[in-house]
Image: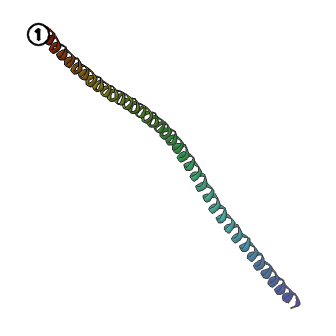
Amino acid sequence: MILQKMEKEVEMANDKAYKEKALCRYAVQKQLDKTKSVETVLRNYADSLAENNAELRRELKVALEEKRATMKSSAKAKRLAVDCLDKWHKEQSRRRYAEDYAVRQERVAIEVESMLSNYESIIQESESKKHCFKKE
């Protein structure tokens, strides 16, 4: 009977040890599963960051190419604007020169006409005096 009692105690102790080991195994397995889950989440996050990084690099490359093209276009537009402005200034200068020349020509024409009038009046006076001298 003592033997049976001891066997029962040993069996209960074995059952208790088995349960404790089972609980420990379950806790360790639960921790492993949780760690694997977190590892999977982190791996997915790292993969998504890598994809985002690659996409951002492509976008940066495209943006830099667009910037270069825009700067080229801007420089070309600036050159055209400067050329047009220079052309406008030259045309303004020519127009002012032509206007000044026309004004000078008008003044000369007026002076010539005045001189002609003076000469005509002198000639008429001279002819009238000539007639007077002839009559005398």
In this rendering, the answer to whether 48 lies above or below 9 is: above
Residue that label 1 marks: 135
Q: Quadrant of residue 61?
A: top right
In this view, the residue farthest toward the bottom is 1
At 44% from the left and 37% from the top, the residue drawn is 77
Percent position of residue 132, x then y: 14, 12
Q: Relative to residue 2, is residue 81 drawn left or right?
A: left
At 53% from the left and 47% from the top, the residue drawn is 59
Q: Quadrant of residue 99?
A: top left
Percent position of residue 7, x then y: 84, 85
Q: Relative to residue 95, is residue 46 drawn left or right?
A: right
In this rendering, the answer to whether 94 lies above or below 78 is: above
In this view, the residue farthest toward the right is 2
Of 47 and 105, the residue lying toward us: 105
- The kind of residue tagged 1 is Lys
Of 55 and 76, the residue lying toward us: 76
Q: Relative to residue 37, is residue 136 drawn left or right?
A: left
- Label 1 residue SS: helix
In this view, the residue farthest toward the front is 136
In this rendering, the answer to whether 70 lies above or below 31 is: above
In this rendering, the answer to whether 72 lies above or below 18 is: above
At 46% from the left and 37% from the top, the residue drawn is 78
